[in-house]
Amino acid sequence: MIFLTPREKEIINLLKKNPGMSQQEIADELKITRSGVSAHINNLMTSGYILGRGYILREDTYVAILGGCNMDITGSTLDNLKERDSNPGKIEYSSGGVGRNICENLARLGVNTSLLSVVGRDDAGKNILTELNRINVDSSRVLITEGITPHYLAILDETRDMYVAISDMELIKNIDKDYVEKNKKIIENAEFTVMDTNLEEETLDYVLKNLKGKFLIDGVSTKKVIKIKDLLDKIYFLKVNIYEAQALSGLETDNIDRLGEDLINKGLESLVITAGGQGSYYFEKDFKMMRKPREVKVLSASGAGDAFMAGYAYGLYNGLEIEERMATAEAAARIALMSSDSCSKDMNENNLKGEIYDY
C-alpha cells in the first residue's frame, strides 16, 4: 500500500475543493515552489491517486481502457459493389480503434474514462488526442511515439455492412509489458478495465496473469481472439460474434448454446455472443439468456460492436442487473447503427434511455 506524505495530502485536499487549480495556484496556496508542486503531482499520478489532466482523483470512480487508437478510412459504394473494379462512392476519415471507440462511447455516456493506448507523432495522432480531450477523456497516459498512427481501411457494401477491411496496427506493439507496468496503478485502481485483442498476445498475457482487477475483453476478430485462448479463466466478461466464438472454442458448429456453454466450461466467468439478426446470447455458469434484436434503419455497422461493449460496460459500471445491462448494450449498438460515424454524436445517457424505454 502506498501512503501519502503530509504535503501530498494537502495537495489532494486542495484539488478536491477545486479540481481546476493550476500548479502555480497550488504553489501559492501552500507557499512552495511550482517545481515542488509538479514533483508531488507526478508522484500522485504515478501512484494512481491522480488520473491525468483535469486532476481526476482516484476516489472518483472510473473505467480504464487498454487498446487500440487508429484513424479509420471508410469507403462506401453508391451502387452494388463490384469486385476488381473502381466503384463510385464516398470516402470518409474518422478517429477509430476498438479501444478508443469504446472509450469515446463511455465518455459520451458520462463515465469517467482513462485511456491507455499509443499514437504516432503525426497529424492523425494529434487529431485523435484533440477529439478525446474535447469529450473529457483522460488521455494523458496515451503513448506518443515515432511512427505512423495505426490505420484501419474498411470497404462497405451497398447495405453499409463491411465487405472487407485492412488494418495497419504495427505501432500497437509499443503497448508492451514496460508500458503496462508504468500504468499498473491506473488499471488496478479502476472499477474495471476494458481491453481489445488488437493488443499483442504477450501484453494480454502479462496483464491478465499479473495485474489485479476485473477485465472485460472485446474479441475483435477470429484471428486476434485466439490470443486469449489459454487465458479464459482470467477474464470476467468476453464479447465475441459467432465466428470468433467458433475460433476460440474450436467447435465447428453454428449452435450458439453449445459454443457458449463450451467457453464457460473453459473458465470464462461471463460471455456474450452476438449473432446479427439472430440476436445476442448471454452466458454464465448455470444461467443463459437470449435477446432478439429490434429492427433499425442501418446507416453503418462499423461501430456497432464497440458501442455494444460500451453499453454493457456502462450497465456494469452503474450496477445494473444483467437484463438491464444487455438492454443498454443493445440500445447503444442501435444508436451506433443509425449513425454513419464509428462513434455516434447522438450517444448520451438521455438518448440511451430513450432507445431502451421508448419502444
Image (spheres, rainbow, N blue to C red):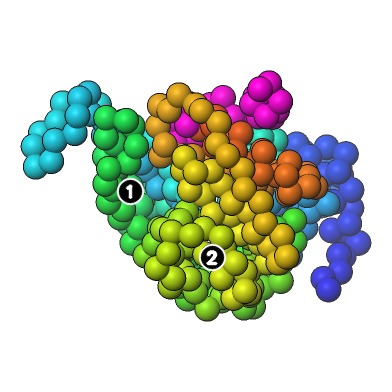
Q: Residue 187 carries which label?
A: none
Residue at the (51%, 58%) spot, across then down: 256
SS assignment at label 2: helix
Q: Are marks 1 and 2 in contact (CB under 8 Å)?
A: no
Which residue does the numbered mark 1 point to in the structure image? Answer: 151
- Which residue appears farthest toward the left when viewing the image? 85
Left or right of residue 112: residue 80? left
Question: For the point 59% across and 51% down, which residue is it?
Answer: 281
Residue linked to disc 2 = 258
Q: Quadrant of the C terminus?
A: top right
Q: In this view, does 296 lie above or below 204?
A: above
Quadrant of residue 184 in the image?
bottom right
Please report the bounds of the magenta region as a residue range.
337-359
Q: Can you say whether 230 is above or below 220 in the image?
A: below
Q: What residue type is labelled 1?
A: His
* Left or right, residue 113 beside residue 130: right
- Residue placed most toward the observer, 52 or 149: 149
Q: What type is the residue that disc 2 sits on?
A: Arg
Q: Which tag is nearer the camera, tag 1 or tag 2?
A: 2
Count of marks, rendered view:
2
